[in-house]
């Protein structure tokens, strides 16, 4: 009878453990949803048009390029790296699309792979130099920021390449859905990125490398291929961001995405990704993107000047970094 009691209670215990685990893992998301809801409510009360379907659809279709770049940035930050080149790589990739389609007469389906290859190539260069030359990724990607931006100017002759309707359908809201194919693609990448990070050996190794790279090496795992891979993924997604932004603008602008790398880092930090490595969530980063976009759009609708928007957005980023530092120090104190 005792064995039977154990058999009967074991499934119940397992269900309780699973439920408590799910509740614990959902707490950060609940907090971010609450903050996002408060922001939406505040701006909805301050501006009559903020909660309109037009504004919400506009918000959804503004974020795809920042979203895909932030996914790659999250992976890089988790391994204790940083990629400051993503904005310039996006511009370079966009320039490749524009030059091939406008000057070379290439169709979109042929130009896009070349664009993605350019982005992935820049990312691979960042990873290889940073890992094997043991140069901080901050320095390497800062150099790539200038290289890629210069390449974008050279490819386009410092002029905007107007492409038109052959590419703009990617960023145009679909009838009846109010969101664009680019938005749906960005959401799919967020889901795939979260699954990669939480449900694969690759993702667990990334977290382990960011937490303690020396322990990973002592365990017989070579961290170099994984570190290079995340930089390559970051470059690839920056290339995809170039396609998305080109479609939204219907043109390739060599001045595009200046400072976008800072917005991506801010989204990651606001979402809880640690700048010291070892902790991060793709879904949380997506919430960070939403918060930044809602904040910037809401401030614009209530008539805030550009300097005021910069001050407020910057202050939010600083607060998020301080909270990250406090959380990290608190965790060390209780280890």
Image: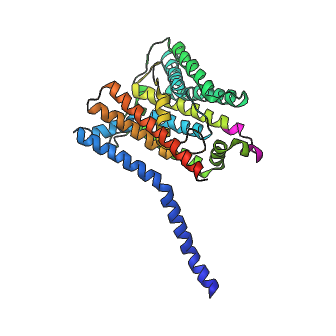
Q: Quadrant of residue 250?
A: top left
Nearer to the camera, 50 or 164: 50
| Residue stretch rendered in magenta on the structure | 216-226
Residue 162 pos. (x, y %): 42, 18
x, y percentage for residue 172? 37, 33
**Residue at point 58%, 38% (across, down):** 77
Decide if residue 257 is on the left or right side of residue 17.
left
| Front-most of residues 333 and 115 | 333
Q: Name the residue furthest top.
A: 157
Residue at the spot x=29%, y=37% of the render? 55
In the displayed structure image, the side of residue 83 where residue 43 appears, left or right: left
Residue 141 image position (x, y, % from top left): 60, 26
From the viewer's perspective, tell me whether residue 31 is left or right of residue 127: left
Q: Is residue 164 above or below residue 332?
A: above
Residue 173 shows in the view: no
- Whether the magenta-drawn stretch holds residue 335 is answered as no
């Amino acid at each position: 009878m005792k064995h039977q009691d154990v058999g009967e209670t074991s499934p119940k215990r397992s269900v309780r453990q699973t439920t408590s685990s799910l509740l614990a893992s959902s707490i950060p998301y609940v907090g971010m949803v609450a903050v996002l809801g408060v922001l939406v409510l505040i701006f909805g009360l301050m501006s009559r048009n903020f909660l309109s379907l037009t504004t919400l659809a506009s918000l959804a279709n503004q974020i795809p390029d920042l979203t895909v770049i932030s996914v790659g940035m999250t992976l890089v930050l988790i391994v204790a790296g940083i990629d400051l080149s993503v904005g310039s790589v996006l511009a370079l990739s966009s320039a490749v699309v524009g030059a091939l389609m406008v000057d070379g007469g290439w169709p979109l389906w042929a130009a896009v792979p070349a664009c993605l290859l350019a982005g992935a190539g820049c990312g691979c260069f960042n990873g290889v130099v940073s890992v094997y030359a043991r140069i901080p990724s901050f320095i390497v990607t800062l150099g790539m920021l200038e290289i890629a931006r210069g390449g974008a100017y050279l490819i386009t002759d410092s002029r905007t390449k107007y492409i038109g309707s052959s590419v703009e359908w990617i960023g145009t809201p679909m009838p009846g859905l109010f969101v664009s194919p680019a938005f749906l693609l960005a959401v799919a990448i967020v889901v795939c990125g979260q699954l990669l990070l939480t449900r694969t050996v690759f993702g667990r190794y990334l977290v382990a490398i960011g937490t303690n790279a020396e322990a990973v090496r002592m365990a017989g795992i070579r961290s170099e291929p994984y570190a290079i891979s995340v930089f390559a993924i970051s470059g690839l997604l920056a290339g995809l961001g170039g396609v998305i932004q080109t479609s939204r603008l219907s043109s390739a602008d060599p001045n595009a995405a200046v400072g976008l790398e800072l917005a991506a880092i801010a989204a990651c930090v606001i979402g809880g990704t640690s700048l010291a490595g070892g902790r991060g969530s793709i879904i949380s980063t997506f919430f960070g993107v939403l918060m930044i976009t809602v904040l910037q759009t809401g401030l614009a609708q209530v008539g805030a000047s550009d300097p005021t928007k910069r001050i407020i957005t910057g202050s939010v980023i600083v607060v998020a970094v301080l909270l990250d530092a406090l959380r990290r120090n608190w965790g060390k104190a209780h280890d």
